Image (cartoon, coloured by chain):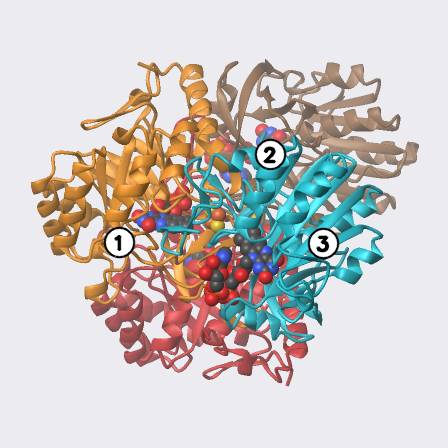
Chain colours: A brown, B red, C orange, D cyan
C-alpha cells in the first residue's frame, strides 16, 4: 500500500478502557478528570477525545493535559453526560477514543491565548506545550466571577503572563475577556492568537486579531456523533468542513467564510442560530 | 467522454464511484465530496419528520469496519431539500435516499425530491420497518413491490432500491425490477453488535447496529455477483470499497457503479480521486477502452 | 475445579475454548490442540463417503478473515473413526461434526461416532444441502426438526446443532431446541467471494465460499446475543474469536463456550492458552468466582 | 497488543500478482520460472510459495532463488498444474502467497546437501545462501540420467564441491545418490546435512547422518490446501505437525518419530502408504 501514514485503521475508532485516577475540582463549575491511558503519542494541544461514560453518552472533550500514561479532561457540567463525568470517582472506567482532530499550530515565538468557559481546557494544554518549548505567551481568561476562573495556579506555575476578566469584577478586569484583546495586541507583538470558548467571544477575538494583522486560530465546538469524519454531524457550512477531522482548530480567515458565530447544526442536523 | 464515464439508465456520471448514504450527510459536505471526485453523492436517508437519532455512542470501529446505529438522524426531508440541497451546485449528481414508513411516505418524499431537481432517488428498503416490528422491508417482497411500484408511478427520474443482505435478497430484487426499479444497490450494513468487556456493556446505545467496511466486502461482492446474473437492471455495489482494487472487484462482478462509505473514515475525501485514478490506470494498463467494457467481465474458472 | 470449568449439559470441559470444525481436521492435530489448551475439539464435518474436496485454491486471506470453499474434504466417517480418532487420548473431549445428506446419513454417522466413544456430535446444518439445491438445511425448519429428532432419538451423548447466519436463525434454532438439541453453535461462515483483479478471475475454484474470522465477529456476536435471549439450551459462540477479549464478548452475550477457527492461522495453536490465560486473569481481576457467573452477565444500557 | 511478530495478518494469506519475467529450461524435466515480485524480506532457504495459476490449481513450490524484486521456482512436470507452470511465458500472471514455513537452519560452517528430483530446487537456494555467508558445502545431486541433473553450472559458479549420481551412470557415480552419503560422511566432517527430494532418499540420508552423529534436516512434501496452517491437510502423523507451518524443514530425529517415509495423506485426508 502506498498511502503511508495518512491512512488510519478502523480499530482507532474503537474504545480503549481508561481508568479514572484522580478527580479534581477546578472551579465551582469545572472538574478535571485524570484518566490512566496509554497513548502511543502525546496528543497535540487542541486535539480532543471522545469520552464514553458507560452509564451515559459519549461526548467530545479537549485534552487539557497529558503525560506518557495519562490524559486529563476538564469538564463543565452542562447536561446529563457532563454531570456524570463530574461525578466520576477514582477507579471508575470510561471508554476513550482519540485523540482526534488537528490541534493548534504552535509556530512562532509569542502567543496570545484567549479563553473562556470550557475553552480554557484546550488552551491550558497549549500553554503548557508552549512553555515546554521555551516560548512565550500571554493568557487571557474570562469568566462570570472569580470562582469560575480555572487553572490560575497552573498558569502561574508555568511562569506565564496571565490577565483575568470577570463580568462582576471580582477578579482582574471588570468586563468580558475580549475587552482585553485589543489593548494587548496594540501593546505587544504576537506571532499568533489562539482562542477557545464561547463562539461569540471567539468571533470577536478573530476579528480583532485579523484587524491587527495577527494570525489567529480558533477551536470550535459542534455536535459530534462519531468524532472521526463519517457522520457529518459536526459540519461547518457552507464550505463543508468537519470540525472533528478538519478541525476543531481552524484558521480565523477560513472561519469568517463560514457559519462561525452564526449557525450550528443540532443532533438532527437542523441549522440553528447561535 | 472519459474512459470512466458510466451510464446508469438515464443517469450519466463522470465516474462510477459514489458516496454512500449516511456518510457526511449534510449538503456542504456532499458538495465537497463531488468536488473531491465522487461521481455522485447519495444523501442520508431522509424521513418525513426530522429525527435526532439515537444517543451516542452511535458508531464504533471494529476490525476492518464500523458498527453503527445512528438511528436515521436527519433534519427531515423538507428541511434537507430547503437548506442542504441548495449547498450543492450539480443537483443532477445528487441521489436522495429515502426511508419511508410505508409506501405513502416514500412517494411523498420522492416527489418533493424530484421537484427539487435531483438526479435519482434511492429507496432504503434495508432498514427496519417500524410498522412491521423491525423486519426489514427488503425481506418482504410484497411490500417491496408496492413501494417501488407506487414510487416509480409518480416519478420521471430513476428509482434505485437499496437492499440488505438477507435470504430474500435475490427474490426481492427481482420483484423490485419487475415493479419498475431502475437499479439495485447492494448492500446495506449487516446486523451486528459490539460489547465492551471492561464495562461489560454493549457499546452502542441501541445495543445492536450494522456492520460496514472492508469486513463485509467479500459478502457484498458475492451479492453483487449473484444479482448481476439474475437482474437486467444495473447493480450498484456497496460494502467495503476502500481502494481501486475493491472497486474493480465489484465492477468485474457486474456492478455498474460502486458506493464508498466507511472508507471515508480511514482515508478521508481523497478516497474518491484515489479510486478513480487507480481505476483509470488499470483500464489503460489492461487495454479497456471504457469502464463499461470492464463491467461484468469476470472470467469463468478454467 | 478451576474457575474456567464449564458444563455444557452433560459435557464437562476444563475450559470453554474449543477448536472449531474444519480447522486442523486430522486426528493428530486435534490431539495437539487439546494438549495446547483447547477445552474440546470439533472434527472436520464428516460425510458418509470420503471427499477430496474442491480443487485449490480453496481458502484465501482477506481483510481480517478467510474465505474458504474446501468442499468438505474428509476421509469419510469410517476412515476417520478408525484412524484419526485413535490418535486422540481423551475421546471425551472430541465432538464429531457431521455433514449428512439427509436425516439417515446424520443418524448413521452419529451412531457410529457415539460407539467410538466421543463426547458429543455437532450437526452441521449450515452447509449447502445437496438434495435441496444448495439451500442450507438451517434455512428449512422442517428439515432441521427431522434431522435433530432422528439423531437425538438414537443417541445418548449430547447433540449440538451448528447454524449459519440467516433470516431463519432464531426460528430454526428454536425448532432444534424443541426437537431435542442440547446446544446451538452459532455461526458458520457467511456467503462470500473473492476476485483477483489482475487475472480478473474468482480466486476460489468454486467461485463462492464462506467468510470467517474477525471480520464476522460483530455479526456472530449479535446472533449469540439474540439466541441466548430466545433459547433455554446453551449457545456456543463461533466467529472471529482471536483473543480473550473476543471470547469474553461471546461469554458476556450469553455463550456457554466459544470456538476458535481462523485465528489459528494468525496465532497458531498457542491461541488456546493465550485465551484461557487472559480469561482467567480477567475473571480474577473482576472478581468472578467462575466463568459460569460471567456468562450472560452483560449489563443493560442505563 | 502484546503478541509481537509471531502474529500474522490475514492479508498475508491473500494472493499477490506475480509477473513471469523469464522461463528457463533446467533439464529435460525441470523448468525454472522467474517471477517479478516485491517481497518485504528475502525468503529463507527451505521456505516455499503457494503458486496459483489462474487457469489451473494452486500448488506449493520451494523458492529456488530470490532477489530483491524477484523469486524463482523450479518445477518438475508432474501433473496438470505443474505442466501449466512449465508452459508459462514472459508476461503471464500468477498469484503468489508466502513465503511460508520454516526454512533450513544454516548454523555451522560446513554442510552436506543431498538432493534429488524437485528437491534440488530448495537446496540450490540453500547452497547460494551458504556461499553468500562464505561457508562451505558439498552438494550431492542424484537423477535417473545426466540430462535430468539440474543446476550443475549454478553450483559450479558458486564454487562449491559437487558430486553427481545417475542411475544409468551417464554422469558421475553410477547408482543412487544416497550411496555417496556414507563415504563422504566418513571422509569429511560436516556440521549438518540437509536433504530434499524423494522421501525414501531422505529417509536413507537421515538415517546415515544420524548414524554418523551429524545433525540432519529434511524438507518434506505433503498435500497442501492452504499453506498456512488451518486446514490440516499437510499433517505429519502421529505427532501432529503441519508441514506448511511447522516445516517443511524438520530435524531428522523428529521425523523418525513420524510417518516420514511410511504414510502421507491424500486430498481427502486418507492415509496412504508411501
Ligand atoms: C471538540 C470539542 C471539544 C470540547 N471540549 C470540551 C471541554 O474540554 N470541556 C467541556 O466541558 N466541554 C467540552 N466540549 C463540549 C462538550 O462536548 C459538551 O458540553 C457535552 O457534549 C455536553 O453533553 P451533556 O450530555 O452533558 O449535555 P446535553 O444536555 O446533552 O447537551 C448540552 C449541550 O451540549 C452540546 N452537546 C451535547 N452533546 C454533544 C456532543 N455529542 N457533541 C458536541 N456537543 C454536544 C450541545 O450543544 C447541547 O445543547 C467540547 C466539544 C467539542 C465539540
Ligand atoms: C513444501 C513443498 C515444496 C515443493 N516444492 C516443489 C518444487 O520446488 N518443485 C516442484 O516441482 N515441486 C515441488 N513440490 C511438489 C509440487 O507441489 C507438486 O508436484 C504439485 O503440487 C503437483 O501438482 P500437479 O497439478 O502438477 O499434479 P497432480 O496431477 O495434481 O498431482 C501429482 C502429485 O503431486 C502432488 N500434489 C498435487 N497437488 C498438490 C498440492 N496442492 N500440494 C502438495 N502436493 C500436491 C500429489 O502427490 C499428487 O499425487 C513441492 C511440494 C511441497 C509440499
Ligand atoms: C455511519 C453510517 C450511517 C449510515 N446511514 C445510512 C443511511 O442513512 N441509509 C442507508 O441506506 N445506508 C446507511 N449506511 C450504510 C451505507 O450507506 C453502506 O451501505 C454501508 O456502510 C456499506 O458500505 P461501506 O462498507 O462502504 O461503508 C450508513 C453507514 C454508516 C457507516
Ligand atoms: C478452512 C475452513 C474449513 C471449515 N470447515 C468447516 C466444516 O467442515 N464444518 C463446519 O461446520 N464448519 C467449518 N468451517 C467453519 C468454522 O468451523 C467456523 O464456523 C467459522 O470459520 C467461523 O469461525 P472463525 O471466525 O473462528 O473461523 C470451516 C472454516 C474454515 C476457515
Ligand atoms: S462528528 Fe461525525 S463527522 Fe465529525
Ligand atoms: S496446508 Fe493447510 S495446514 Fe498445512
| Closer to viewer: mark 3 or mark 1 | 3
Residue beneath disc 3: D124
Q: What is the chain identity of the residue bearing mark 1?
A: B
The quarter of the image holding the N terminus of chain B is bottom right
In the picture, residue A80 is in which quadrant? top left
Residue at 19%, 65% (x, y): give it: C131
Question: Mark 3 touching mark 2, by CB under 8 A?
Answer: no
Q: Residue at x 77, y 55 (%)?
A: D68
- Report the Cα–Cα distance between label 2 and label 1: 35 Å
Number of numbered callouts drawn: 3
Q: CA distance from mark 3 to mark 2?
A: 56 Å
- The circle drawn on residue B130 is 1
Report the Cα–Cα distance between label 3 and label 1.
69 Å
Q: Chain of mark 3?
A: D
Q: Secondary structure at mark 2?
A: strand
Numbered disc 3: secondary structure:
helix
| In this rendering, position of residue A226 left or right of residue C75 | right
Judge the density around disc 3: few (<14), some (14-19), many (≥20) Cα neighbours within 10 Å.
many
Check the image and report above or below for D88 versus D127.
below
Marks 3/2 same chain: no
Residue A86 vs B117, above or below: the answer is above
Q: Which of these two is toward me, D86 or D198?
A: D198
* Residue in the foreground of this view, choosing between A86 and C31: C31
Furthest residue in direction left, as rendered: C153
Secondary element under disc 1, as helix, strand or loop, is loop
Q: Which residue corresponds to the image point at 77% horizontal and 38% vertical from the top-left?
A: D110
Q: Chain of mark 2?
A: A
Q: Dots 3 and 1: beta carbons under 8 Å?
A: no
Which mark identifies residue A49? 2
Amino acid at each position: 500500500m502506498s498511502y503511508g501514514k495518512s491512512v488510519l485503521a478502523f480499530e482507532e475508532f474503537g474504545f480503549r478502557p481508561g481508568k479514572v485516577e484522580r478527580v479534581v475540582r477546578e472551579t465551582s463549575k469545572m472538574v478535571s478528570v485524570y484518566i490512566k491511558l496509554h497513548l502511543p503519542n502525546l496528543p497535540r494541544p487542541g486535539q480532543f477525545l471522545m469520552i464514553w461514560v458507560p452509564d451515559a453518552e459519549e461526548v467530545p472533550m479537549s485534552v487539557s493535559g497529558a503525560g506518557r500514561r495519562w490524559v486529563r479532561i476538564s469538564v463543565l457540567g452542562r447536561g446529563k453526560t457532563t454531570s456524570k463525568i463530574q461525578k466520576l470517582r477514582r477507579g471508575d472506567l470510561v471508554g476513550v477514543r482519540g485523540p482526534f482532530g488537528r490541534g493548534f499550530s504552535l509556530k512562532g515565538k509569542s502567543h496570545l491565548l484567549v479563553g473562556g468557559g470550557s475553552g480554557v481546557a484546550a488552551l491550558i494544554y497549549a500553554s503548557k506545550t508552549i512553555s515546554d518549548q521555551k516560548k512565550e505567551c500571554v493568557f487571557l481568561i474570562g469568566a462570570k466571577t472569580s470562582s469560575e476562573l480555572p487553572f490560575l495556579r497552573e498558569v502561574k506555575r508555568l511562569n506565564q503572563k496571565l490577565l483575568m476578566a470577570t463580568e462582576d469584577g471580582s477578579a482582574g478586569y471588570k468586563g468580558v475577556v475580549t475587552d482585553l484583546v485589543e489593548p494587548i495586541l496594540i501593546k505587544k507583538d504576537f506571532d499568533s492568537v489562539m482562542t477557545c470558548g464561547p463562539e461569540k467571544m471567539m468571533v470577536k477575538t478573530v476579528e480583532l486579531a485579523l484587524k491587527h494583522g495577527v494570525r489567529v486560530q480558533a477551536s470550535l465546538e459542534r455536535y459530534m456523533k462519531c468524532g472521526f469524519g463519517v457522520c457529518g454531524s459536526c459540519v461547518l457550512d457552507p464550505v463543508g468542513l468537519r470540525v472533528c477531522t478538519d478541525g476543531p482548530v481552524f484558521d480565523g480567515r477560513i472561519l469568517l467564510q463560514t457559519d462561525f458565530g452564526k449557525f450550528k447544526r443540532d443532533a438532527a442536523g437542523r441549522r440553528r442560530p447561535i | 467522454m472519459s474512459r470512466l464515464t458510466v451510464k446508469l439508465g438515464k443517469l450519466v456520471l463522470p465516474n462510477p464511484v459514489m458516496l454512500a448514504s449516511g456518510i457526511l450527510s449534510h449538503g456542504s459536505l456532499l458538495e465537497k465530496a463531488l468536488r473531491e471526485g465522487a461521481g455522485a453523492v447519495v444523501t442520508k436517508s431522509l424521513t418525513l419528520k426530522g429525527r435526532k437519532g439515537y444517543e451516542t455512542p452511535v458508531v464504533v470501529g471494529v476490525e476492518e469496519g464500523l458498527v453503527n446505529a445512528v438511528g436515521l438522524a436527519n433534519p427531515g426531508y423538507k428541511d434537507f431539500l430547503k437548506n442542504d440541497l441548495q449547498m450543492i451546485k450539480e443537483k443532477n449528481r445528487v441521489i436522495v435516499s429515502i426511508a419511508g414508513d410505508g409506501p405513502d411516505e416514500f412517494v411523498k418524499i420522492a416527489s418533493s425530491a424530484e421537484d427539487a431537481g435531483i438526479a435519482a432517488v434511492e429507496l432504503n428498503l434495508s432498514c427496519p420497518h417500524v410498522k412491521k416490528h423491525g423486519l426489514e422491508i427488503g425481506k418482504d417482497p410484497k411490500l417491496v413491490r408496492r413501494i417501488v411500484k407506487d414510487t416509480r408511478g409518480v416519478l420521471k427520474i430513476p428509482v434505485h432500491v437499496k437492499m440488505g443482505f438477507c435470504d430474500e435478497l435475490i427474490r426481492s430484487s427481482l420483484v423490485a425490477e419487475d415493479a419498475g426499479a431502475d437499479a439495485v444497490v447492494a448492500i446495506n450494513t449487516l446486523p451486528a453488535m459490539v460489547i465492551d468487556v471492561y464495562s461489560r456493556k454493549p457499546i452502542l446505545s441501541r445495543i445492536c447496529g450494522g456492520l460496514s467496511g472492508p469486513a463485509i466486502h467479500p459478502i457484498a461482492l458475492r451479492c453483487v455477483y449473484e444479482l448481476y446474473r439474475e437482474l437486467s437492471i444495473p447493480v450498484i455495489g456497496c460494502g467495503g470499497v476502500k481502494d481501486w482494487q475493491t472497486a474493480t472487484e465489484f465492477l468485474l462482478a457486474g456492478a455498474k457503479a460502486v458506493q464508498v462509505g466507511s472508507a471515508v473514515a480511514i482515508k478521508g475525501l481523497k478516497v474518491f480521486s484515489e479510486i478513480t485514478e487507480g481505476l483509470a490506470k488499470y483500464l489503460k494498463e489492461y487495454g479497456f477502452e471504457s469502464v463499461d467494457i470492464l463491467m461484468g467481465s469476470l472470467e469463468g474458472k478454467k
